[in-house]
Image: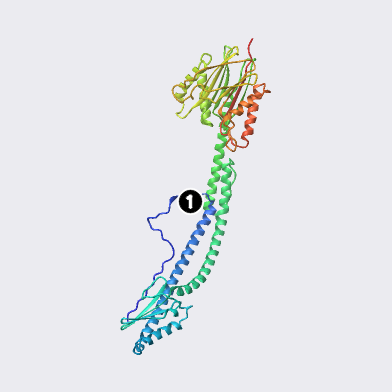
């Protein structure tokens, strides 16, 4: 006797082939999002993902195995039925085909459609094919002796009689689903309780110490050095806490030393920036507001032996310590030249040649030099790519002092040119660095040069100190709580004519 049974069950999932790797941008976004989470969140996500994935995988494999077992059991049952029918057909065949047909219809009628949905019998006796009537199994299709994804088949043969009994596969699967649902509920509840326990341990043993350590490190980032740090947790976290605490003490010592050095540098720079004039027939004022502890701006008013005055303002690119060293270099280069003999343009051209030899390739300087003659009736200025400065007339008019050459340190020749300005008593020369006009508020809006001109045109202004105070206050109102991003220097010099 020959018997065979087969079934093919495929899950309704799409399996990505090895050559179809997921696109990188989604994975990168997921990795970036995960990297921004806290360690507690990362651990909880990983643990829950691993536990959940393992649980789902186990339930899926358990369900698949249950379905296979149910299908194989159903095939065995149908095969037994097919053998019983094949044995019964021998005597019935002698009566006639109608007796065989009646028998297989009676068997189908006796089957419970809820337990054996779509029960069908096919009998082949030699070349004759008999089938149970479609109305008995609720289907109107033309079955064949073959298997499909939706049906299970049991077969048997005896001499020239071959019998195939088939049913819908979902009948066997449904019973397995009910059993799998009960098992899944029990396993899921156990897994949930286990995940809760793991999450609780993570929060107690990892989250609290890491939170304390994170708070401490944030304090170090804000400059809170040397505070004690005590954390619980594992030996590894305690070791990390001790190392971070030692690092905080070391950073505190270094910061105190750095502050002492910066204080000395600030005192030196303020000394270099001292605006003075020995002549009693004029007055001057200066505002100096570094973006950092020290600045890259340099300004000076020099009284020359012939009674004339030289006003200088330089702005080194960048800010901070490197820019402050550049400003000190500009001061040294200026003192090395004969400022009483050289006109402003030649002074800047010679400084450019020396600055090229002494500075780094990326170091640039803008600078303006104004020479006021002894009679105080003419000023000559030259500007090496410097921010627009101004001559405020005694009647409130404002004349811009534009650049007359290129930045120092840009190329071998700054190509600066002198420009003459007629002066009258009460006129005021106002020099500024670009930190004034380029001051930004929290929205990124620039203060701008138009606002400077409008303030300088205020009729009530009399002294340089008033002008500088008005500009500084207005710039501060514009900036509000925004961080200062560049050094700001203003020099004002008021003219009095000599008899």
- At which x and y percent is residue 87? 36, 86
**Split into 4 quadrants, where in the image is the N terminus?**
bottom left
Drawn side of residue 147 relative to residue 454, left or right: left
Which residue is the extreme one toward the top? 499
- At which x and y percent is residue 433? 56, 27
Q: Camera-side residue: 289 or 419?
A: 419
Is residue 232 visible from the viewing direction of this image? no
**Mark 1: which secondary structure?**
helix
Where on the picture, by quarter, is residue 189? bottom right
Is residue 56 visible from the viewing direction of this image? yes
As drawn, 214 above or below 277? below
Neighbourhood count class around disc 1 (C-alpha, 10 Å): few under 14, some 14–19, many 20 upward: few
Give the residue at x 55% y 51%.
210
The residue tagged 1 is 31
Q: Camera-side residue: 318 or 370?
A: 370
- At which x and y percent is residue 413? 45, 21
- At which x and y percent is residue 128? 33, 82
Give the residue at x 54% y 37%.
254
């Amino acid at each position: 006797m020959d018997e065979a049974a087969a079934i093919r069950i495929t899950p309704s999932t799409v399996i990505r082939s090895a050559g179809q790797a997921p696109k990188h941008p989604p994975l990168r976004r997921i990795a970036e999002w995960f990297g921004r989470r806290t360690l507690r969140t990362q651990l909880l996500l990983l643990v829950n993902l691993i536990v959940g994935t393992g649980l789902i995988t186990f339930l899926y494999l358990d369900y698949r195995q249950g379905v296979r077992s149910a299908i194989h059991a159903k095939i065995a049952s149908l095969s037994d039925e097919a053998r019983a029918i094949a044995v019964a057909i021998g005597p019935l065949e002698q009566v006639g085909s109608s007796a065989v047909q009646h028998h297989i219809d009676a068997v189908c009628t006796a089957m419970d459609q809820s337990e054996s949905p779509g029960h069908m019998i096919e009998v082949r006796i030699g070349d004759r094919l008999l089938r149970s009537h479609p109305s008995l199994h609720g289907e109107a299709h033309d079955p064949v002796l073959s298997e499909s994804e939706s049906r299970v088949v049991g077969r048997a043969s005896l001499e020239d009689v071959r019998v195939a009994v088939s049913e819908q596969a979902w009948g066997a699967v449904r019973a397995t689903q009910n059993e799998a649902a009960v098992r899944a509920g029990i396993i899921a509840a156990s897994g949930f309780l286990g995940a809760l326990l793991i999450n609780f341990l993570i929060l107690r043993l990892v989250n609290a110490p890491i939170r304390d350590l994170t708070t401490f490190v944030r304090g170090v980032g804000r400059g809170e050095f040397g505070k004690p740090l005590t954390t619980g947790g594992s030996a590894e976290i305690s070791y990390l806490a001790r190392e971070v605490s030692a690092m905080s003490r070391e950073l505190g010592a270094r910061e105190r030393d750095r502050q002492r050095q910066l204080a000395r540098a600030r005192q030196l720079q303020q000394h270099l920036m001292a605006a003075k004039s020995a002549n009693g027939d004029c007055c001057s004022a200066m505002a100096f507001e570094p973006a950092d502890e020290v600045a890259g701006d340099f300004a000076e008013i020099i009284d020359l032996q012939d009674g004339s005055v030289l006003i200088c303002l330089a702005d080194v690119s960048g800010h901070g310590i490197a820019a402050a060293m550049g400003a000190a270099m500009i001061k040294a280069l200026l003192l090395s030249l004969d400022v009483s003999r050289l006109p402003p343009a030649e002074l800047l051209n010679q400084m450019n040649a020396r600055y090229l030899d002494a500075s780094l390739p990326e170091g640039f300087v803008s600078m303006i030099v104004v020479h006021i003659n002894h009679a105080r009736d003419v000023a000559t200025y030259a500007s090496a790519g410097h921010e627009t400065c101004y001559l405020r007339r005694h009647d409130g008019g404002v004349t811009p002092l534009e650049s007359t050459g290129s930045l120092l340190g840009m190329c071998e020749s700054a190509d600066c040119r002198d420009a003459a300005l007629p002066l009258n008593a009460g006129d005021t020369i106002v020099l500024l660095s670009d930190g004034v006009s380029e001051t930004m508020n929290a929205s990124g809006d620039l203060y701008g040069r138009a606002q400077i001109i409008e303030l300088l045109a205020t009729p009530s202004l009399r002294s340089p100190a008033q002008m500088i105070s008005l500009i500084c206050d207005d710039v501060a109102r514009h900036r509000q709580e925004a961080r200062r991003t560049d050094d700001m220097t203003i020099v004002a010099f008021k003219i009095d004519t000599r008899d």
